[in-house]
Amino acid sequence: MRDDLRKDKIRTYYRALYQAWGPQNWWPARSQFEVVIGAYLTQNTAWTNVEKALANLRAAGLLSVKGIRDMRLAELERLIRPSGYFRQKAARLKTFVGFLDRHYRGSLKRLFASPTAELRKELLALNGVGPETADSILLYAGNHPVFVVDAYTRRIIARHAILPAEADYEDVRALFERALSPLPHSVAEMTESSIQHLAPGLPGAPHPPSLMSAAKRTALTQVYNEMHGLIVGVGKHYCKKSQPVCDGCPLQRFLPGAK
Ligand code: SF4
């Protein structure tokens, strides 16, 4: 498929999903640091388990840079145990805070003031930070214009013959960024009345707004934010791993061969 067709498809999917489901209110967190912790804890586990670990940290009054820094490793392991791989994740969170202290005097504000490409490289050099974690931190905690590619993204574009499932992470990310970067202008054209607002509990209904979902960001960052949230909705409710449930999926009419 030609690159311009791929980009057109992705833009069309964005519009279709946004009109069907409206803003998704990502990421469900109260602070930048909570996004960082969530991005680590969500590796290889369901978000419901992450919520339990975050609730433990919050209840202990330790959901902060200082909290993670001062806490004994064994205590951190105990609190985040519900998220699975808790020993590995606790060590990685300590590594992140150590990095923040050494390079940015413990300040997330200083960290996120770095240029995007430079900061991405630094995050990727940390133990336990792959591209999806780094990009989640950059986009959802730092409001940097980086698109997050996850397993749902790959599954959807493979099933729609846009890119193969084994495509390189960076190729998928670059494609989405090229496709979505002109969108902030046309999104403004989507009038409020053309966007559906779903009742809680329905597939595609948004998270309740959070302090981080309502944070100030550029129009481009907002488009990346929404597209990832919309894709998660498709993956969670329709584009399941073993078998897609295409009936009712807002992308059904774009399937290859669809009339
Ligand atoms: S569920 Fe079906 S229509 Fe929806 S994204 Fe997956 S393959 Fe496409």
Image (cartoon, rainbow, N blue to C red):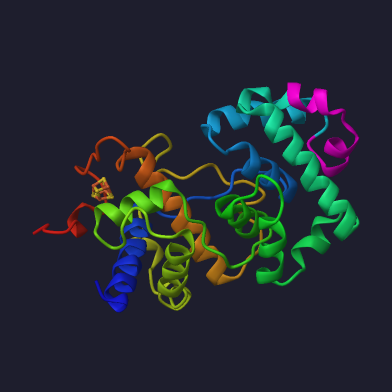
Which quadrant holds the N terminus? bottom left
Who's the residue at 40% across and 76% down the image?
186
- Quarter of the image holding residue 7? bottom left
The answer to whether 103 is drawn above or below residue 243 in the figure is below
| Residue 96 visible in the shown view | yes
Could you tell whether 189 is left or right of 140 in the image? left
Number of numbered tags placed on the structure image: 0
Image quadrant where residue 69 sits: top right
Instruction: Name the residue at the left extreme.
Output: 259
Q: Quadrant of the C terminus?
A: bottom left
Whether residue 198 is visible, yes or no, is: no
Query: Between 112 and 129, which is closer to the camera in this rendering?
Result: 129
The relative height of residue 174 versus residue 41 in the rendered view (above or below) is below
Q: Find residue 127 and report its horizontal and vertical position in percent.
A: 70, 47
Is residue 122 found left or right of 206 in the rendered image?
right
- Magenta portion: prevailing SS class: helix
Foreground: 24 or 200?
24
The region drawn magenta spans 63-78
Residue 52, by quadrant, is top right
Residue at 59 percent of width and 51 percent of height: 130
Query: Up-down: is 104 above or below 80?
Result: below
Residue 123 appears at what percent x and percent y? 70, 57
Instruction: Let me know if residue 33 is in the magenta part.
Output: no
Is residue 65 covered in magenta? yes
Q: Position of residue 103 (x, y in %)?
A: 86, 59
Which is nearer the eye, 146 or 191? 146
Residue placed at 51% from the left, 42% from the top? 207
